[in-house]
Structure formats: C-alpha cells, structure tokens
Amino acid sequence: MRKVYLSFYLLLFTSYLAIGQTWSAVGTQTYAPGNATFLGIYNGQLFAGVSNLVACSPRATVLEWSGSSWVTTSGLAGASANTSIIYNNNLIIGGALSTPIQNVAEWGDTAWNAMGGGTLGTNALVEYNGNLYSGGLSDFEVWAGHGWTVADKGAINSVYAFAVYNGSLYAGGNFAQASGVANNIAMRGDTSWETVGSGINGSIYALTTYNGELYAAGFFDSAGGKYASNIAVWNDTNWAPVGGGVNFIVLTMTVFNGQLIVGGEFDSAGGKPANYIAAWNGSAWSALGNGVNNNVTCLAAYDSVLYVGGDFTSTGGIAAHNIAQWTPNPAGINELSSSNSVTVYPNPGNGVFILQASSQWLLANSRLEVYNVLGQQIANSQWPLANSSIKIDISGQPAGIYLYRITSGKGESISSGKLILQR
C-alpha cells in the first residue's frame, strides 16, 4: 500500500515539474483601478502606480498592497506616476505629477511629500555615484539634498530609461543628440555625454544589465548598424541582436530567477509565441506560461515572485486586472555540484528535516522555501549566517513528497531537492 501511495505522489510531483510555473492574481482581489504604470518594492511592501480616466482626463494613483487588498495612498495628484526608486532608504516616484510638488515625490509612510521644488519632468530615476538623477522630456537633473538642479541644460531630453553598467551611467530614450552624441542612447562621461557605438535607430524604453552586458529595448530594428528586433545587447564594444528579438515594442525589463524578463506589446519572442511577456536565458527565448491578454508595462521581482503590471484583464485564464504574479517552477534550478552539496536527514522523515551544507559560508544569507505538489509554498526560512545547517518543520502537513529550493540573497537559484514526509 505504501508503494502505491508513494507512486501516486511521485506521479503528482512529476506532473508538477511540467506545469508548476503558475500565474495568479495578486492575492484574492483581482482589480486595481487603472492601468499599471510602475511596480516597486519598499520595506517588503508592493507599491503600484496606476493611471485611469476621470472626466476624460488621466489621473495618477499610487496603491499599496496590504496583503489582502489595494490601499490608495494619500497626498498625490497628477496625470501619471511612471517610475520609482529606493534612494537613501526612501521610496521616490516620478511622473507627470502636480501634488505634492511638480513631477516627483517621496513617500513618508502615511502620505507623499514634496522634494524641493520638483523637476521639469520625470520619466526615469537612477542613483549614480551616490546621487539621484531624473530624466524626462527636457533636462537631465540632479537632486542636491534640498532641491533639483539642471546637470545638462538641453543636452539630453526625452529620456525614458537609465542603467549603470561597468561603472558608467547610460541613458536611453528618443533623442537625436546628447552633447552632440546621436541615436537614442548615450553614456555619461566625466563632463559630457558620449557615444555608444553608432547607437540605435528607434526609441529606447528600457535599459538593464544581465550576465555582465547592457541590454536596451524599445521600438527599433537596428543597433550599431546590425539588425535587432526591438532588443539589443551591448558588450562595451559592440552591439548585437538578442536571439531574433521580439516582434513588437518592449516597454519594460528586469532580471528574475537567473533570466532576463521583458514585457511589452509583442506576441512572439525568438519566433515562438509569447503573449506580451517573455524570458531570455542568455541563449534562447521562452514564454512565461500563457502570458497575459494585453500589454505589459512594468515588472518587479521580490521574494521569488515576479510581479507584472500593465493593461490586461486575465492571465492563463485567471482574472487578474492589470496586476498579476508569476511563480516559477521551483524545480527549474541547477543542482549544486558534489563539492557544494546539501544533505537532507532524516529523509524520509516525520516532518522535521535538517539540511546540511558542505560549508558554513556556502549558503549564508540564502533563503529556503518548501512547496507542496500543487506549487503552494508551505514554509520558508532565512539560512542563518555562518551556520552550515538549518532545520525546517513541515510536520503539520499531510504525508507525501515536497520540494525544497534554496535561492541566494539576489534571488538566484542555488539548489533544490525532495523532502519525503511519512507517518
């Protein structure tokens, strides 16, 4: 009888490995009042910027997820909140705002506060060399601690994205020149903006780094004079296409679970179906399940979950109005090599398991998570610093097979395995 019982769970476990990657709404509430414009994590809480029409005019709202419902934050007015950043341990947002001050605001835990006299316009924010910079439709500005000052008058405009790569600041957008540098992307030198190869022939809406290279995405078909369909990669010397690219506009990018995630207005990546969101692993494109049913405009990764925002109403057949979450298959993890092994004992066991690493520093600051065969997380724990072992107790769960995974402090997958709970 026990053989039959374990075989049944092994069958479920195998099935889960194939379909365990799941989409869901954020919590049980599936409605956010407006199209999502940014997603950000602050003090462990999810914040979302949304924009909707009120009396035929756009209105910005920033929501905070309480764990069960969306709560509207106070003290904000304007047309849109487009971007966010954590700077000096504070949440800063930018957009087309009028209250509490023009175009930029700081969260004060109960309401939004002014930052000096505001900016001339903010589409993107970045921290570089300890300073906070804003890019928008006009000037490149820097926060001086009490107010904003123009760093380069008219040198760079229509900026939609920033990234720091190899110690240098890069800006992307829809600009003809930055201090004489053409083609929609520029690198900040000591005193002026510098060329990035021969640039890109269309608008850039997202910049990020992945696997030691700089990725630029938007609406274009050429980078450095080479064909590149809406996404390209810069290796500090040359531009190159990214596996055939995607077939329409990319609006957002982030790195999650060891992959580059892109979202936008496309339905194909690398020639394969991918509904508005796709993953690049450095060599090939893949879809994230069935994706969503309309545009993806923003992404945020936190605690092994990818949050996705945009202008959609469902994902994978599940109602998820404008904000959803993607939980990857915990089995999609590279096992540790034998020299970096994790031993589990007793296994099978009665629900209390010890995971032993080969080195006390190997898994320091990593995170242990345990899932059942339905893909539901049932336990988690932070691996203790300078400790080679950790105890996990799932004795309150039914007998069966469970999956553990270990991720680094950066969310990178480290190891996985089975826990067999017997009575």
Image: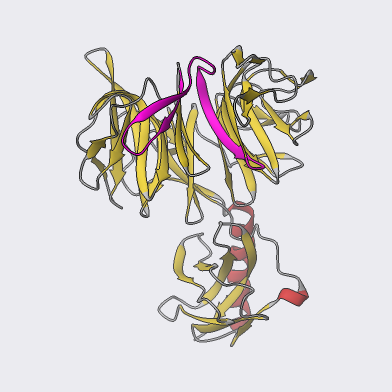
Residue nearest the observer in this picture, 333 or 366: 366
For the point 51% across and 55% down, the residue is: 304
Tell me which residue sits at (26%, 12%) in the image. Answer: 56
Q: Is residue 5 left or right of residue 325?
A: right
Q: How is the image coloured?
A: secondary structure
Against 260, is 376 above or below?
A: below
Q: Magenta stretch: residue 255 in it?
A: no
389 relative to 300 in the view: left or right: right
Q: How many marks?
A: 0
Residue 322 pos. (x, y %): 39, 33
- At x 79%, y 32%, the residue is 237
In this orientation, does residue 1 appear? no
**Residue 88, percent across and down?**
39, 48
- Tell which of 16 and 230 is nearer to you: 230
- Could you say which quadrant of the image residue 93 lies in? top left
Depth check, front residue: 286 or 314: 286
In the rendered image, the quadrant that contains the N terminus is: bottom right
Q: Nearer the viewer, residue 165 or 111?
A: 165
Which residue lies most toward the front here? Answer: 191
Residue 82 can be seen, yes or no: yes
Q: Quadrant of residue 108?
A: top left
Relative height, residue 84 to residue 99 (above, below): below
Residue 100 drawn above or below residue 53: below
Highlighted magenta segment, given as a residue range: 139-167
When the figure is inspected, residue 56 is found, relative to residue 302, above or below; the finding is above
Across and down, in percent, residue 202 comes to: 63, 15
Left or right: 139 as drawn, with respect to 95: right
Examine the structure image and report whether residue 142 is included in the region drawn in magenta: yes
x and y, in percent, of residue 344 in the image: 61, 82
